[in-house]
Image (cartoon, helix red, strand yellow):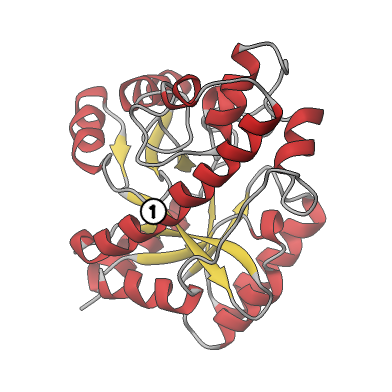
Amino acid sequence: MICDLHCHTKLSDGSMGIEDIIAQAKRTGIEWLSITDHDTMASFSRASILGERAGVKILKGVELSAWDKKRGRKVHILCYAPRKPDRLEVLCFKSCEIRKECSKEMIAKVMEKYPITLESILKHTTASKSIFKQHIMRALIDYGYALEFYGSLDSELFNRKTGSCYVEREYPDVNFVIDLIHTAKGVAVMAHPALYDSIELLEELAQKGKIDGVEVNHWSADESYRKELSAIAERYNLIQTGGSDFHGLYNNVPTHLGRESTTKENLDRILKLSAKMK
C-alpha cells in the first residue's frame, strides 16, 4: 500500500491543481493521499469529492508554520484528520498574513535589483492563499534572469542565512500550534526535521508528550538521520510518517508523488488517534 501523506497544490506553493494531483496519485498507484498545503485547509472539501471519484482515499491534512523560540527558527507541524478544523482557521489566517508581509518585503528588495513587475509575480499566485518565494523566482525565470528555481540566483537572494532579499518573521509558538491542533481534534506530526534542524526540539516535545508523530521518510533525511528519527519515535511511541513533499515544478529536488510513503500500520495509528480524541 502506498500512502503519501505530504504534498502541495496551487493553494500554497505547489504548481499543480488538486485535480491533477489526485489524477496523478491514481496513476501512481497511491491508495491514500494527504494534501498538506501550507496554512490553508481550502483543499478539504474538493479533495474529498475528487478522491472519492478517482478511487483515492483522502486524509485531510495541513502543514502549519510554527516557531521554535528556544532556537529562534522555523518549524513545520503537519496536522492530520482534524475533526474540528474550524478551530484552526484563525491560526491559518495569521500565518498567511505573516508570510504575505515577508513576501512583500522580499519582492520590494528583488525589484530594486531586477526590472520585473509586481504583476509578473502575482499572476503566478492567483490560486494561492499566500505569496511564496517560488512565485518570485518564477517571474525571474520568465524574464530570463535564471533557468532554475534552486540554482545560484535563488541562493543569492533567498538563502535563509545569507540571502540578500530573504525576509523572515516569527510564526506562532510551536507549543501553541500543537495545542491548537489537539483542540481541533487533529494529530500533530513534526514535518521533515532535517530541513530546519529540529531533532532537539522533537525530543523535547516527545519528552513532554506533546507531539504525536514525526515524518521520518522524507527526501531531506539520509539513512543515518532516518535511523536517528526512528529511534526517537520508538523511544517515545511516536507515529512515523512519510511523504513525497511534492510541489511539482517547484520541487526542491527531483521527486514524485509516492516517492516516500507511510506504512499502513502508522496510517491506522493516525486514524485511531484522531477518532478517539475527545
Q: Residue at 68% x, 65% y: name it.
A: 229
- Across and down, in percent, residue 237 comes to 54, 76
- Left or right relative to 146: residue 172: left
- Left or right relative to 47: residue 101: right
User: Which picture quadrant has residue 181?
Assistant: bottom left
Residue to which mark 1 is pinned: 97
Position above or below: 102 against 257: below
- Left or right relative to 29: residue 49: left
**Dot 1, how many residues are within 10 Å of its Cα: few (below 14), some (14-19), or many (20+)?**
some
Q: Work out whether residue 135 can be spotted.
A: yes
Q: Residue at 69% x, 53% y: name it.
A: 195
- Across and down, in percent, residue 60 comes to 30, 49
Position of the C terminus by quadrant: bottom left
Position above or below: 138 against 99: above
Q: Residue at 69% x, 69% y: name it.
A: 199
Describe the element under mark 1 as helix, strand or loop: helix
- What amino acid does circle 1 point to? Glu
- Across and down, in percent, residue 217 comes to 62, 49
Q: Residue furthest bottom?
A: 208
Q: Residue at 64% x, 17% y: name it.
A: 141
